[in-house]
């Protein structure tokens, strides 16, 4: 059940980011103030980063919950994904 909850939270985060991105596009089309547009772009980027981190964390938890048999290869894979987000 935790995996479903994690997935739902990530989907909701991405949907919010999608809405924010639509707002950014509108701001650009309306030729809004550059500083305001950049602030919103940073917010969208941050929201997507948080969704990515949540996905990596959920995978980590799932691996540990599956008996704690996390292989070095799995750890390397998760570390690469985590670092790709930063």
Image (cartoon, helix red, strand yellow):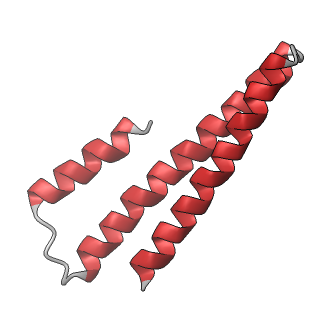
Q: Residue at x 26, y 53 (%)?
A: 78
**Toward which corner of the image does residue 2 lie, by quadrant?**
bottom left
Q: Residue at x 22, y 81 (%)?
A: 66
Name the quarter where the N terminus is drawn: bottom left
Give percent across and percent down for residue 25: 73, 26
Name the quarter where the C terminus is drawn: top left
Give percent across and percent down for residue 9: 56, 67
Give percent across and percent down for residue 79: 27, 48
66 to the left or right of 24: left
Give percent across and percent down for residue 36: 85, 24
50 to the left or right of 58: right
Q: Residue at x 10, y 54 (%)?
A: 73
| Camera sees residue 39 | no
61 to the left or right of 75: right
Total marks shown come to: 0
| Camera sees residue 52 | yes
Q: Residue at x 65, y 45 (%)?
A: 17
Residue toward you, 71 or 58? 58
**Toward which corner of the image does residue 34 lie, by quadrant?**
top right
């Amino acid at each position: 059940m935790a995996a479903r909850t994690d997935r739902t939270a990530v989907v909701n985060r991405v949907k919010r980011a999608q809405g924010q991105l639509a707002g950014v596009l509108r701001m650009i089309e309306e030729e809004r103030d550059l500083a305001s547009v950049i602030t919103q772009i940073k917010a969208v980027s941050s929201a997507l980063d948080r969704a990515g981190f949540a996905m990596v964390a959920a995978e980590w938890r799932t691996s540990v919950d599956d008996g704690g048999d996390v292989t070095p290869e799995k750890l390397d894979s998760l570390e690469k994904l985590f670092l790709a987000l930063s």
